[in-house]
Image (cartoon, rainbow, N blue to C red):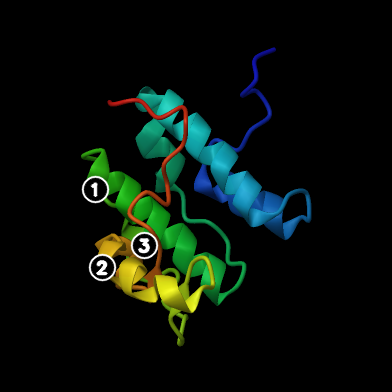
């Protein structure tokens, strides 16, 4: 049994875990990203399936993650990202510090920015990242 046997392998798995109360969003997403980066052969399948909905913020984040990962790794952007996660009405700034807002606006990848999510340029980085 490997370290990744029971980890979320798709964004839909992440959402399923959160909705079922099995895991909070952030740790589940981090585990998914670890798996995604370590399995280049399965990356398209990992982002392809349309996840269920959680709430406006998390739905926007999941769609942004799928779109951003697809663009960075040269994969087709899943069609579901166009209409999933567009319910956020107020901007969200990661970190919650007023002093970071300018940096986050400047650094946010397009997939996040267009959904009113402002994150650091390395928001999806993980220690296990590999080039594909």
Q: Which quadrant is home to the C terminus?
A: top left
| Residue that carries the numbered disc 2 in the rendered image | 106
Numbered badge on residue 81:
3
Q: Is residue 16 above or below residue 128?
A: below
| Residue that carries the numbered disc 1 in the rendered image | 71
Marks 3 and 1, how far apart at CA: 12 Å
Residue drawn 39% across the image and 75% down it = 101
Residue drawn 70% across the image and 54% down it = 24
Which of pointers 3 and 2 indicates the residue nearer the eye? Answer: 2
Mark 3–mark 1 CB contact (< 8 Å): no
Q: Number of labelled discs?
A: 3
Marks 3 and 2, how far apart at CA: 23 Å
Which of pointers 3 and 1 indicates the residue nearer the eye? Answer: 1
Secondary structure of residue under mark 2 = helix
How far across and down, in percent of the image, does residue 72 sit? 25, 43
Secondary structure of residue under mark 1 = helix
Q: Which quadrant is home to the N terminus?
A: top right
Q: Earlier in the sequence, mark 3 or mark 2?
A: 3
């Amino acid at each position: 049994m490997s370290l990744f046997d029971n980890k979320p392998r798709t964004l839909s798995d992440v959402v399923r875990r959160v909705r079922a109360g099995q895991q909070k969003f952030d740790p589940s997403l981090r585990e998914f990203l670890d798996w995604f980066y370590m399995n280049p052969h399965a990356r398209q399948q990992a982002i392809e399936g349309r996840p269920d909905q959680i709430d406006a913020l998390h739905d926007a984040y999941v769609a942004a993650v799928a779109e951003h990962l697809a663009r960075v790794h040269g994969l087709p952007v899943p069609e579901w990202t166009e209409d999933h996660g567009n319910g956020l009405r107020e901007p969200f700034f990661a970190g919650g510090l007023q002093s970071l807002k300018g940096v986050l606006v400047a650094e946010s990848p397009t997939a996040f920015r267009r959904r009113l999510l402002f994150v650091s340029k390395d928001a999806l980085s993980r220690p296990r990242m590999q080039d594909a």
